[in-house]
């Protein structure tokens, strides 16, 4: 490598390393809203409408980063909270941010912890096309309740068998001359799933990961 190229390389290296290949993931942000009711802080949850993707899941308000609209991920979290719950930026106080979470499904989540004014909570204008209902759970419940723990397994599939029984090739392992091991599903990566049950609702997935992280700092 030429000396000039080495200088160019050093100049182009990021001052603050980010996530390599981030542009290949779905980048999103969520707001973790805290509401004080009768002297105790509660987490505000929403149940996704049955007509949208992942309908019926319990989550925090949030969504994808939109270029040209959001200047940063905090903007994303605030915008999505307003769109879904009608809570305005002026009624939200950002307390800080949890670590970036990269979910096994290929989603990057930037979680922001915030205090929401009680009056704003009571006057929410919920978008029923996205949200079936909202509810509060006291933080003390999560401090005192041990989550159920399960395990999921992920495999990498170089092909699939379609409804007609034909093999659809995603990655031409044989054609590329790669080792035999890659001609069938590989990886078998396992990861933990935590589940909370409250008043007939089941909270799991990304939301339960964020809850556990939040509670560890509370």
Image (cartoon, rainbow, N blue to C red):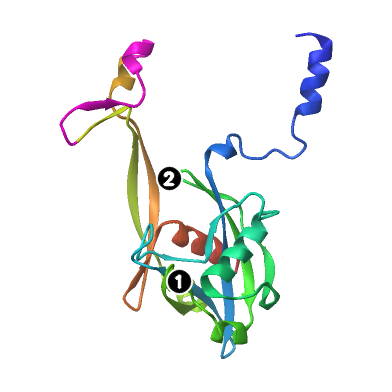
Over which residues does the magenta segment extend? 163-179
Q: Is residue 116 magenta?
A: no
Quarter of the picture containing the N terminus is top right
Q: Where on the picture, by quarter, is residue 55? A: bottom left
Q: Where on the picture, by quarter, is residue 54? A: bottom left
Q: Is residue 173 magenta?
A: yes
Q: Where on the picture, by quarter, is residue 158? A: top left
Q: Is residue 3 left or right of residue 200?
A: right
Quarter of the picture containing the C terminus is bottom right
Relative depth, front residue between 215 and 120: 120
Outermost residue on the bottom side: it is 38
Q: Which residue is mark 2?
A: 105
* Label 2 CA crowd tier, 10 Å (few <14, some 14–19, many 20+): few
Q: Is residue 37 left or right of residue 193?
A: right
Image position, residue 66 (x, y; %): 60, 52
Q: Which residue is mark 1?
A: 46
Q: Is residue 169 above or below residue 39?
A: above
Q: Is residue 199 left or right of residue 71?
A: left
Image position, residue 39 (x, y; %): 59, 88
Q: Is residue 174 above or below residue 185?
A: above
SS at mark 1?
strand
SS at mark 2?
loop
Image position, residue 138 (x, y; %): 49, 79
For the point 33% across and 47% down, which residue is it? 152
Q: Which mark is residue 146?
A: none
* Label 1 CA crowd tier, 10 Å (few <14, some 14–19, many 20+): many
For the point 56% across and 91% down, which residue is it? 38
Relative depth, front residue between 108 and 129: 129
For the point 66% across and 60% down, which residue is it? 75
Q: Earlier in the sequence, mark 1 or mark 2?
A: 1
Q: Are marks 1 and 2 in contact (CB under 8 Å)?
A: no
Relative depth, front residue between 81 and 210: 81
């Amino acid at each position: 490598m030429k000396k000039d190229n080495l200088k160019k390389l050093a100049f182009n290296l990021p001052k603050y390393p980010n996530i390599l290949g981030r542009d290949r993931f779905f980048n999103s942000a969520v707001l973790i809203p805290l509401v004080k009711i009768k002297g105790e802080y509660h987490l505000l949850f929403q149940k996704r409408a049955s007509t949208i993707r992942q309908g019926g899941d319990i989550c925090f308000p949030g969504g994808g980063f939109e270029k040209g609209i959001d200047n940063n991920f905090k903007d994303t979290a605030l915008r999505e909270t307003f769109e879904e719950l009608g809570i305005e930026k002026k009624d939200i106080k950002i307390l800080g941010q949890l670590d970036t979470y990269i979910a096994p499904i290929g989603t990057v989540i930037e979680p922001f912890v915030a205090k929401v004014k009680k009056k704003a909570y009571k006057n929410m204008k919920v978008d029923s096309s996205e949200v079936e209902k909202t509810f509060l759970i006291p933080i003390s419940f999560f401090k005192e309740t041990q989550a159920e723990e399960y395990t999921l397994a992920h495999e990498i599939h170089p092909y699939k068998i379609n409804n007609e029984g034909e093999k659809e090739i995603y990655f031409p392992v044989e054609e590329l001359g790669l080792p035999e091991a890659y001609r069938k599903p590989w990886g078998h990566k396992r990861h933990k799933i935590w589940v909370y049950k409250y008043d007939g609702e089941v909270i799991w997935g990304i939301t339960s990961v964020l809850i556990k992280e939040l509670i560890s700092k509370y």
